[in-house]
Image: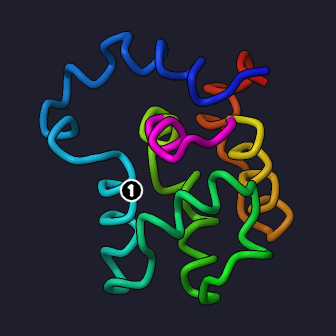
Amino acid sequence: MIDASNLQTYLESGFLDEWPIMRQQSGLELAVRHLNASVGPVLTTGQLASALRAGTTRDLPVSPTAAALISSLFAELPPDLILRCTVEAAADVHCVDALYRESLADALAPVRAWETSVEHLL
């Protein structure tokens, strides 16, 4: 089973070396800052981490707006950053992909970049 500890090697492979600014903040902070950019401080890093670990927003105590932001994660952020968040949240990539599948069920468009990035991990 692929889990957060297996992803650490992938993340240490050097893909972030091209963007040193990304090393100064946690992936969760970067993700939440980007997702909140148009709506203000709605989503927290804790809420995003919980959703990544749970593989759903359905049972989490988050507002509908925060749930929508979490669902947009896959369309809004590059897969490498999502995987970085996965490690930081101590989430399993299968749960994160379940969150992606939930967003598809909620009528969000498929994100080929995400699907291609994780197909070898699932």
Secondary structure under tag 1 reads helix
Q: How far across and how far down the image is residue 55, in percent?
A: 75, 55
Give the residue at x 33% y 83%: 41
Magenta-drawn stretch contains 30: no
Where is residue 51? Give x, y as percent: 64, 62
Residue at 20% from the left image edge and 22% from the top image edge: 18
Q: Amino acid at mark 1?
A: Ala
Residue picked out by circle 1: 31
Q: Which residues are magenta?
A: 84-92
Find residue 113 and report its horizontal and vertical position in percent.
59, 34
Quarter holding the C terminus? top right
- Asked if residue 122 is positioned above or below residue 76 in the image, the reply reads above
Q: Residues within 10 Å of mark 1 (few under 14, many from 20)?
A: many
Q: Quadrant of residue 2?
A: top right
In the shown orientation, is residue 88 left or right of residue 109?
A: left
- Asked if residue 88 is among those painted magenta in the image, a careful observer would answer yes
